[in-house]
Amino acid sequence: MLIKLIRRNLDSKEDVLAKCFDLTPRESEVLYWLTLGKTNRDISAILGLSARTVNKHLEQVFQKMGIDNRTTAAVMADRVLNSE
């Protein structure tokens, strides 16, 4: 008999992003939806925010991640989420 042990992370994807990039819970939610290819307008509808508020959260996320665009943010976040 062969038993394979798998280490599972019990944190939500948003929690993983928040810890990895030192984000607030709302910033990590916005980043998570960004990784799924959502636009600012889509994210604002999903989270019940204005598109301008989503844009401000993303500005903070970019600053904390040391980047300057949404594509790089999405790729970096996706790598973190899929490295588990």
Image (tube, helix red, strand yellow):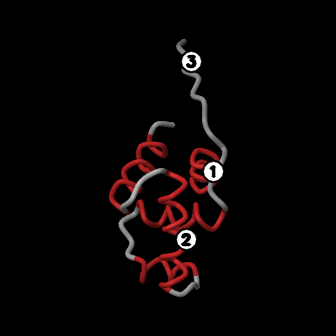
- How much space separates mark 1 and mark 2, taking CA atoms? 13 Å
Q: Dot 3 corresponds to which residue?
A: 3
Q: 67 or 45, which lies in front?
A: 67
Mark 3 or mark 1: whose residue is earlier in sequence: 3
Which residue lies at the image location 55% right of the left edge and 81% below the top edge? 53
Q: Nearer the viewer, residue 2 or 71?
A: 71
Expressed as whole percent of the image width and height from the top left, the position of residue 22 reads 63, 50
Considering every residue shown, the one lying at the far top of the view is 1
Q: Mark 1 points at which residue?
A: 22
Tell me which residue sits at (39%, 59%) in the image: 68
**SS at circle 1:** loop
Whether 48 is drawn above or below 62: the answer is: below
Residue type at numbered disc 1 = Asp
What number is the disc on residue 84? Answer: none
Q: Is mark 3 on a helix, strand or loop?
A: loop
Q: How far across and down, in percent of the image, does residue 76 sit?
A: 41, 48
Name the amino acid type tagged 3.
Answer: Ile
Q: How crowded is mark 2: few (under 14 residues within 10 Å), some or many (20 or more)?
A: many
* N-term-proximal mark, 1 vs 2: 1
